[in-house]
Amino acid sequence: MKITLKIMTIVFLSSCAQLHHVQIGEIDNNPKFVQKPFDIKLSEVGVDIQEAGRITKALAGKDSNNEAKKIADIIALFQMGPRTGNPVYTKGYAKNLIQVIYEKCPSGRVTGLASIRETRKYPVVSGEIVKLTGYCLLPKGG
Amino acid sequence: MKNLFVSTVLLTLFLSSCASVNSVSLTPIPAERGNKVFTTASKTIFLGFNFDNDFIDQSVEDLKRQCPNGKISGVLTKDENINYFLYFVWKKQITVTGYCQKYAAEATTGKK
Amino acid sequence: MINKIVILGFIIFGFSCTHSLHVSHVSDFSPTYKSYEQGELVKSRAEQFVVLDFAFDTDYVDQAYTRLQQACPQGQIQGITTQYSTDHGFMSWTNVIEMQGLCVK
């Protein structure tokens, strides 16, 4: 029982990382500038209702089995459409990306941008992440 | 009559297509937008059997041919799937649009 | 009792509107390399409503592209963020393209 609990804890606390899309921009290695790296992560919690249904079905009693499945199926009709990772309930969580870039690099001299769309998957929930790494070019000698 | 109706419905489903976007990206857009360049590359895939994506390579070459001695900016790259019948047959299509800016001809007097 | 609470939680979360962000791309800032104050933020958005996957074209992407350029005539646009997302609904969904960048004149 203790070993099962420990294993379950490790399983539930670990996550799987899934890469959906990556794009790398041009890289400017101008010797007159120093490159200061920065990274930005904007994320939102995604929920997998179908997985929640399966877990509920496994943990609930026999009478609730069919109920949970029926509800999950009905809910699936209301959440139709293409999806990347799990669906989220907040729209526009990555809308202010350009403003955040300028906070990291006010001069606007940005290069080596890598745009990454990934998911950190946990049981039922996931982190839907927009990650951006790049370099801010700072003139040498101030 | 019933068979004809079913055949018509199936044929309609087969010949119509459903388009969806996989990814889209855009590079910085120039001020001068007079000279538009465009290319599209596609590949029809049966039952998911696809052994390479070399069809994409011709897109860059095609754009370069349309803009000799120039720079292509404001490049919109659209990667889409066009499904013909329940994803038994689909077409992968890459559409690239941009603007060509010609470089000014440099004087070749050879003077220092 | 716990089953009913779980099912109620299902219902509350399940019937809310969900969204999915597929692609978030940021373009380069060259050759202009201007600061935020030296330009003007311009945006464009285009949508396509789809019922049961019957969508026959992807022209909404080109519409967003054209609208962004119209928002900055005679100027260069740097640092363009392009986001492709879907708003889920009842047996239908809306594909959305949003583009924003800094217009530099």
Image (cartoon, rainbow, N blue to C red):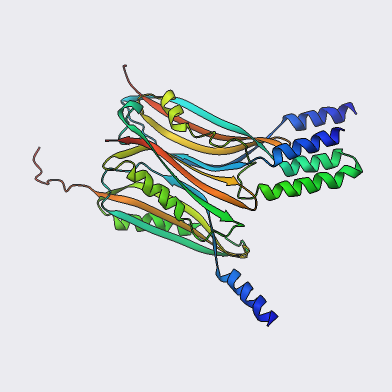
Percent from the top left, x then y, of residue A119? 62, 37
Query: Residue most toward the top?
Result: A142
Does residue B58 appear to the left or right of A48 in the view shown?
left
Above-or-below relation of A39 to A71 = above
* Residue A104, quarter of picture: top left
Does residue B74 appear to the left or right of A98 in the view shown?
left
Of residues B75 and A89, the one drawn nearer to the viewer in this rendering: A89
Above-or-below relation of C66 to A27 = below
Residue at 18% of width from left, 47% of height from top?
B104
Of residues A2 and A85, the one drawn nearer to the viewer in this rendering: A85
* Residue A111, quarter of picture: top left
Does residue A9 appear to the left or right of B63 in the view shown?
right
* Residue A45, quarter of picture: top right
Percent from the top left, x then y, of residue A134? 45, 31
Above-or-below relation of B87 to A134 = below
Residue C28 appears in the figure: no
Residue at 37% of width from left, 44% of height from top?
C68
Residue at 47% of width from left, 40% of height from top?
C25
Residue B79 appears in the figure: yes
